[in-house]
Image (cartoon, rainbow, N blue to C red):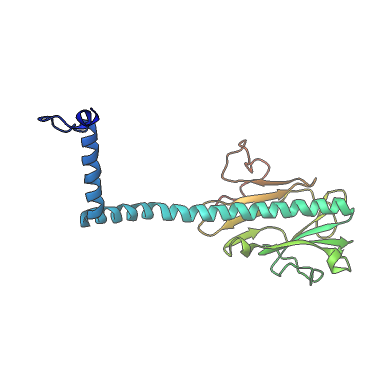
Amino acid sequence: MLSLLSAPRAGLRPARPPRGSRKLGAALRFLERRTQRGVTLLELMITVAIVGIVAAIGIPQMGQWIRNSSVNSAAEILQNGLRQAEAEAIRRNLRVEFMLTNGTPAASGIKTLTATTNGKNWAIRALDGLTPLADENAAYVNGFQLKEVSSDITVEGPASVLFSGSGRVLDNKGAAISSHQVYRISRSSAEKALCVFVTPGGGVKLCNPALASGEPFACQPQISLVKCPKA
């Protein structure tokens, strides 16, 4: 009985797979042959041309983005340095100097470091009156070399700013100032310049001279374009 049921009947064809399965199988075989065949010279040339066009458009924009980002980084680092100098003066209740310099900021030599207008680096040191503390380790607070961001970064600003123990801003002779102290940060070939300014009361702010007066982070009207020109 089982053999009769399992044996195929004479004259009957084997069942065919559904039509959709045949199409799927044909498509898979086509793709397999296509993969094995590789790409043609025309396809390769088109791909190379597309890559070249994308690179020609994207690489200059990427370079400009990197230059603008380095200006942002240098400005924020300088702003943080000024804020640290002010906070250290209040914490220690003594004068602290934020200075631009072309020397190397470090604990060793901090007492003889020379403040320079438009210096390439900055340093923070604690003072006894108008002179650095006798102990170099106590005098040195922090420092930064702008070449760590980029050797093309330029800072234009006063040689030094002093913060009193109450957070007020003084000049290098210890007298209270009545105007904003402005640092302009730029980079050659960059489309952006930023300014960091210190108010007489000790406020430290970052602004963009390219923004119109009234916009967030605009320099105007507090800082004129004469003191902080656009890039």
> Residue at the spot x=73%, y=55% of the render?
81
- Above-or-below relation of 50 to 105: above
**Looking at the image, which is closer to me, 2 or 185?**
2
Left or right of 97 in this view: 228: left
| Residue located 42% across and 55% down the image | 59
Front residue of 17 and 219: 17
Q: Residue at x 86, y 64 (%)?
A: 138
Nearer to us in this view, 167 or 176: 167
Q: Position of residue 125 (x, y in %)?
A: 81, 62
Q: Return the residue found at the far front.
A: 1
Left-right relation of 224 to 172 = left
Name the side, left or right, on which 214 lies relative to 134: left
Task: Determine which quarter of the picture holds residue 3.
Answer: top left
Residue 127 pos. (x, y %): 86, 62
Residue 139 % position (x, y): 84, 64
Quadrant hosting residue 42: bottom left
Task: Using the image, determine if residue 24 lies above or below residue 52.
Answer: above
Q: Position of residue 77 (x, y in %)?
A: 67, 54
- Residue 143 seen in render: yes
Closer to us: 160 or 59: 59
For the question of whether residue 228 can be seen, the reply is no
Q: Quadrant of the N terminus?
A: top left
